[in-house]
Image (cartoon, coloured by chain):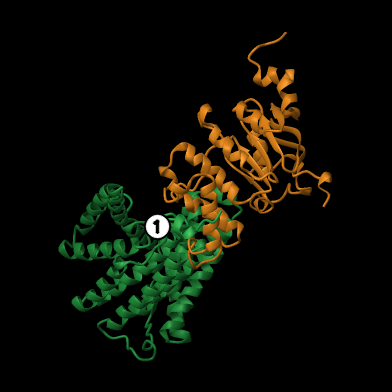
Amino acid sequence: MNLQPRTLLPAAALPHYRLGAMDVLPWIAAIVAFFAFDTYLSLGAQILVMVIFGLSLDLALGFAGINTLGHAAFFGVGAYAAGYWNLHVSPEPLGGLLAGGMAAGVVGLLSGWLLLRTHGLALLMLTMVVTVLLHEVANAWGSVTGGADGLSGVMPDPLFGVFQFDLFGKTAYLYALGVLFLVFLVVRTVVNSPFGLSLRGIRENTRRMHLVGASVHLRLVAAYALSAFLAGIAGGLGAQITRTVSLDRLTFQLSGDILIMLIIGGVGRLYGAFIGIPLYMLMLDRAAEVNPFHWMFFVGLALILLVRFAPGGLMALDERRRRAAQEGTQ
Amino acid sequence: MNYAMNYALETRGLCKRFGAIEVTKSVDLKIEHGARHALIGPNGAGKTTLVNLCTGMFKPSSGAILLNGSDITSVSAQRRVGGGLVRTFQINTLFNGLTVAENLAIPVAQRLGRSWKPWGRSSGDAAVAADVVRLMDELNLLALASKKIADLAYGQRRLVEIAIAMALEPKVLLLDEPAAGIPNGESGMILDLLERLPDAMSIVFIEHDMNLVFRFARRISVLVEGAVLIEGSVDEIRKDQRVRDVYLGRRHHD
C-alpha cells in the first residue's frame, strides 16, 4: 500500500490558519488608522494593547478551553513588573516588556499548577480569587507598587535608542502594533502546531485526552503560563504607553471586560480579539461622547443584539457564511 | 521473556465497593496474549466497572491488576495507556468539534511522541499524516476526513471511537460494547473492523450482540452480579446450563 498523505488528505482535514489575502486586512486597517486618525493615536494604542490581551485570553479560553475570570491578574502583574523595572532597573522599553511578561508567566505557571486540576465553575471562582488576592497584595505592598496611588512617572527610553515616545503617541502606536504582530505570530504558530491540536483535544474532550495517554494537566499549565506571559506583555506595554500603573489593572472588572470583548469577536477563532476589542472600545468611546449620561444603555443594547444575532461572536457569522457557500457548491 | 508465565492482562481478587454496594466481587481475570475475550452478562453485572478498574478510571477497593506481568494497580490512567492498555467507550467519547482526521491525529501524534511540538503543523508532519491516512483508509473513513464528528452519522462515529484506540496501537484493547446503538443487522461493519485488528493485539470486549460474541470471541467470561460465574471457550459457554439460565435463558427450567 502506497498512500500519499498529501494528495489523500484534503487541507480541511487537518485544518490550520493559513495566511491568505484576508490576513493583511487588520494590519492595513491599523496602518490606515495611524494616518487617518492621528489625533486618536493614544486610544488606538490602548486598543492594540487590549487586542494583545484578548489574544492571550483566546489562547487559554478559546483553544485550551480554560474557563477563566482572572486574566487581569496577569495583565496587572505584567504592568506592575514593567513599571517597576522602568523606575528601578532600566528605562529601556523592550527589557521592561520582557520583565512584565516573565513575571506574569511565573504567576501563571504557579497558579496554573495549583488551579488547573479544577474546572467549570470552581475554576472560574478560583481564577477570580487569584486576581482579588493580587489586587490586595498590590494595594498593601506600597513600597513596590505604590499602593492605592499606583506607579507614576514611568518613562521608557527611546525605542531601540532611536524613537522617542512622543506627545502624540505615534511611537507608542507603532510600538504596540509591532508587539501585537509578534504576539499574533506566536499564538498562530502555537495553535497550528501539534501541541495546539492537543490543546483543542483537551477543550473538546478532557476525559478522552487522558485516555489517549496525554498529560492533560501539564499541557494546560504550559498553555496557561504562555497565555499569562503574553497577557503580561500586554500589561507591560500598557504601563509603558500610559506611563502609569494603577490598581484598576488588577480587577475583576477588567477580567470581565476582556472576556466580553473577546466573546463579541468570537472565542477560539484567532481573529476574534481583532474584531471584538476595537469594536467594543470604539463603541464605548463613541457612546460616552454622544450621550454622557446614558451611554451604558446603548452599550447594553448593542450587546443584546450581538448575542441574539451572532451567538458565537462576529467571527462565527463569517464562518456560517463560508459554510453556506461551501454547501452551495457541493 | 517467557510469555507462558504471564498474561497480557490479569486481575487478582479485584474488588470494588461503592459504599455498601459491592459491584466487583473478587474477580480473577486472565487475558492471554492475542486473546479475543468477551465479557458478557446481564445489565448491571459490573462489566463496565471492570473496564474502568482495569484502565484506572476507578481505584479498586482491593486486589491487583497486572499488565503483561507487572503490577499497574497504582499507575495512573494516563500512564497505563503508555503501557499499551487502551479502551473505547460504550457512549462515544470523541473530540466532537474537530474533524475525523484531527480525531486520529491526536492519538497518532501522542503515540509518535510529537504532541508537544509547539510549532509546525500536524498536517506537515509526514509520519503523523501518513498514519492518519492509513487508519482512515482501513476504516473507509477517507471520504469523511474533513467532516466534523458532529456532522457524522452514528455508525461512523462508532468507527471513529474504535479508530482512536487503534491509532494508539495498543497491546491490550478493551472495547466497551463496540456495537452499542448499532442495529443488529448492521453490526457486520463492526465485526469487519474487529477481524482486521492485528493478531498480536489482545482484545477484551463487552458486547450484548450475541452474534458478534459467538463469531469473534474465542473465550468468554460471564459476569453476574459483580462476580465471574463461569469462564470458558465459546462452545463451553454456549452449552452451559447456568449461562442459559442467567443470561441467555428465555426458558425457565425446574
Drawn side of residue A3 relative to residue B36, left or right:
left
Residue displayed at 73% across by 49% down:
B72
In the image, the chain rendered in green is: A
Outermost residue, front direction? A1
The residue sitting at the bottom extreme is A162
Question: Of all residues shown, which one is farthest toward the left?
Answer: A290
- Please, is residue B81 above or below residue B40 in the view? below
Q: Nearer the viewer, residue A225 or A129?
A: A225
Q: Amino acid at mark 1?
A: Gly
Nearer-the-camera pick, A72 or B251: B251
Query: Residue A137: percent from the left, percent from the top?
Result: 49, 68
Q: Residue A10, located in which quarter of the rendered image?
A: bottom left
Could you classify mark 1 by the number of other residues whose Cα lies within 10 Å: few (under 14), some (14-19), or many (20 or more)?
many
Residue at 33 percent across and 66 percent down: it is A20
Residue furthest top in the image: B254
For this view, does A31 lie left or right of residue B56?
left
Indicate the position of residue A148 as horizontal and vertical percent values: 40, 72
Instruction: Examine the rendered structure and indicate whether residue B236 appears above or below residue A71.
Output: above
Left or right: residue A45 compared with residue A15? left
Q: Is residue B175 visible?
A: yes
Q: Is residue A69 visible?
A: no
**Which residue is denoted by mark 1 in the rendering?**
A268
Q: Secondary structure at mark 1?
A: loop
- Expressed as whole percent of the image width and height from the top left, the position of residue A187 reads 43, 67
In this view, A69 is above or below A234: above
In the picture, one chain is orange; tell me its letter: B
Residue A243's x, y, as percent? 35, 80
The foreground one among B253 and B239 is B239
Give A111 or B104, whichever is nearer the viewer.
B104
- Counting every numbered tag in the picture gives 1
Chain for disc number 1: A
Residue at the image position 35 percent from the left and 91 percent from the top: A162
